[in-house]
């Protein structure tokens, strides 16, 4: 298939682009490198050193003989996006090109507005460009399980049949997103459903859980193909962050009681789910929703697992319960359905001891690159404006970093 | 009370500002006159000639001795909005300052993006400004009944108790908005609920039905206080448009079968509902939702009522069923609850023969200002780009207008 991957230089986007190319699809990456820009803004770096995209693409060609096309530009720039889609005439567009961090969206008003405008306008542009230039193309859009929040009833895949006062209807599942970022995804979902209805577009909204891991068969082929591994408090997903903390002897930062339960998946399942969606396109006029995760864990479950994995590797791992910087239930009912991708053929990689060991080992391998000052949460949901952390030079000067963290985060250090 | 009315120069905003001022509240209007700008863009004018806002405010003072403050600026300009709210320290902010036309939002991509960015960013700015400058203030936000769409179950006021698989929860009512404009209001609703939750703000989301009428006790005091009366296909609400069509012998333009059923209310109830919401603020942390309408009608019901009113006044009124330019159900179940404002004391003005006669009479009074070329729908939901109508000079040249309409709308004329 001809597939455009919007945001193909990011964490999930890069792994997906390589996987799809490896499977023989003709892949075009669209990216404007904004994700790399945010690293500079935050003074953070991926744990794993990643090469510039042009080097990555050359390395992929050298290793596999396969080419991936690249169009550098912003999905918020309609002329660029329209031209790219019109000339490529893709069978599917995989849309990762959004600001995807909840804490980033909660820094202050400008970051909230940026996140919502960037994500909503980007997706509107994709929808209009499909309607105008490739109406039969299938949109595979990355949503998030966070759109649902934590309702006290079972979470279905996108829609729910409601029986009420003797009548019934199948309606979009009610959404209770927990950050300006998650809200932007809810806005997208409503816009996509509408455009499928009025224009007969086809779309699959993948409500993805929290992704962990970094290695896929393809990224393992060469040092230059290595994927991002974010461990900072803003872009680091929770399990990756815990592994980095374990590797340098920092306590794992559990927010509140740690009873927050979410859906999780291995990045090797992310890439497979996206391919399954592409291979099985939605019907014209349909906006399907798949819940894309394989297992549910509470945050404390994960911390205990990392602690256990640390023991195997001879690491002493403490667990800190910090005051939750987010406004969320710290213990709640959670039962989210996720059978549709399994029905299409997904064979999950469940979280195993060996995977955890390998994740912690990756963190150990790159431990010299870890900046301990990036671990403590600095964005508080309750504040309309969060001061940005002072950027310290790398490698960190231990004393200065300690002092800085002490003053700003007021929490005990391991 | 000290009340800021955002968008106080518009149709509902102006009537509300005068009503609240008349009741003794200290009113500050915030407006950037974008609504007047859209008239120029579309080549349309309100049926009733409206004075510049400064003249309106002076006339109000001359008639009543009451002053209304004015801050000219854009709610999308945060510095302006923050400063205004900080210095005013209002008890309530009534937020009408959004692009409120569904057809306008459906003209093309730029209008869709403008509508969503303008409305979403404006409301985010209001929420941040409240949090930063007036956290105890009560937001009274104009939403729309169109957020719900036309589900096959009863529509509740904002939230619904769902019993599912043996468990239950009260969740936001599922939304199925029918235009990029209606979508923007759904986005706002989710953002408001979230900010009330994380910051303890108080808000009332008034999901308003279709408003009709133009005269209130206050606007009737002087020619310079007269309110807008939009009859064009883009900004004209359906009943007002039908009255204008009846007045000049044009057929009433019913879209499709006319079975589209909606909630309606008299503008005299709009202003009272807003005051009731202000006088009974939500609790801190609560986002209440009130469905603000008084009666349900189908579009065909209304056309038949206007036809009947025309007969009383000696007018021959035909009804045309045009192909529906919108993508919507032309016949459907509709039962929307609307008891909460009644419980607070609203005494509805129901749609009566005498009100209809007076509406048609207003249209007759100003019939020389009616441009017949503005009546036919020119924005088709199915198209991603709708050509703008050629602007004709006023008064219309009948032959030219006829030809233009024939070619563009391909429908029989009365």
Image (cartoon, coloured by chain):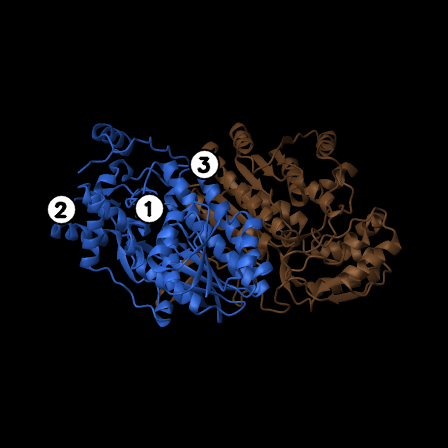
Chain colours: A brown, B blue
Residue A160 position in % (x across, y down): 46, 59
Q: Are marks 3 and 2 in one subunit? A: no
Q: Secondary structure at mark 3?
A: helix
How many angstroms separate mark 2 from mark 1 (CA)? Answer: 27 Å
Residue A309 appearing in the image: no
The residue under label 3 is A131
Q: Which mark is residue B50?
A: 1
The foreground one among B130 and A133 is B130
Question: Which chain's residue wears label 3?
Answer: A
Placement of the C terminus of chain A among the 4 image quadrants: bottom right
Please indicate whether residue B194 sits to the left or right of residue B23 in the image: right
Q: Secondary structure at mark 1?
A: loop
Placement of the N terminus of chain A among the 4 image quadrants: top right
Residue B329 position in % (x across, y down): 32, 50
Q: Which mark is residue B130?
A: none
Please indicate whether residue A50 sits to the left or right of residue A194 in the image: right
Please indicate whether residue B174 sits to the left or right of residue B328 in the image: right
**Going 64% across and 42% down the picture, which residue do you hit?**
A13
Question: Which chain's residue wears label 1?
Answer: B
Q: Quadrant of residue A375?
A: bottom right
The foreground one among A272 and A96 is A96
Q: Nearer the viewer, mark 3 or mark 2?
A: 2
Looking at the image, residue B109 lies above or below residue B216: above
Residue A280 position in % (x across, y down): 52, 43
Q: Secondary structure at mark 2?
A: loop
Q: Quadrant of residue B333?
A: bottom left
């Amino acid at each position: 298939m001809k597939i455009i991957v919007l945001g193909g230089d990011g964490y999930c986007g890069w792994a997906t682009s390589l996987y799809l190319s490896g499977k023989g699809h003709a892949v075009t990456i669209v990216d404007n490198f904004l994700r790399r820009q945010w690293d500079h803004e935050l003074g953070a770096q991926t744990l794993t050193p990643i090469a510039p995209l042009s080097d990555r693409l050359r390395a992929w060609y050298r290793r596999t003989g396969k080419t991936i096309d690249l169009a550098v530009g912003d999905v918020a720039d309609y002329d660029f996006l329209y031209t790219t889609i019109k000339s490529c005439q893709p069978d599917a567009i995989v849309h990762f090109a959004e600001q995807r961090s909840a804490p980033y969206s909660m820094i202050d008003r400008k970051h909230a507005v940026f996140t919502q405008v960037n994500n909503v306008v980007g997706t509107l542009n994709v929808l209009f460009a499909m309607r105008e230039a490739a109406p039969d193309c299938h949109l595979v859009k990355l949503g998030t399980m966070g759109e649902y929040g934590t309702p006290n009833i079972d979470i279905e895949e996108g829609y729910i049949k409601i029986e009420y006062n003797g009548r019934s209807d199948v309606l979009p599942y009610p959404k209770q997103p927990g950050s300006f970022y998650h809200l932007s995804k809810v806005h997208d979902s409503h816009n996509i459903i509408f455009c499928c209805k009025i224009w007969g577009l086809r779309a699959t909204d993948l409500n993805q859980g929290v992704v962990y891991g970094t290695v896929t068969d393809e990224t393992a082929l060469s040092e230059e193909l290595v994927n991002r591994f974010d461990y900072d408090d803003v872009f680091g997903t929770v399990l990756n962050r815990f592994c980095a903390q374990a590797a340098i002897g920092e306590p794992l930062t559990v927010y509140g009681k740690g009873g927050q339960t979410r859906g999780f998946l291995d990045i090797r399942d992310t890439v497979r789910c996206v391919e399954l969606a592409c291979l099985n396109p939605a019907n014209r006029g349909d906006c399907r929703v798949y819940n894309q995760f394989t297992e549910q864990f509470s945050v404390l479950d994960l911390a205990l697992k990392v602690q256990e994995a640390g023991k195997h590797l001879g690491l002493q791992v403490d667990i800190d319960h910090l005051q939750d910087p987010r406004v969320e239930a710290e213990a709640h009912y959670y039962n989210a359905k996720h059978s549709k991708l399994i029905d299409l053929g997904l064979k999950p990689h469940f979280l195993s001891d060996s995977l955890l060991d390998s994740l912690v080992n990756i963190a150990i391998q790159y431990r010299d690159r870890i900046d301990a000052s990036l671990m403590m949460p600095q964005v508080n949901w309750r504040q309309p404006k969060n001061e940005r952390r002072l950027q310290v030079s790398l490698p960190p000067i231990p004393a200065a970093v300690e002092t800085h963290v002490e003053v700003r985060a007021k929490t005990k250090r391991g």
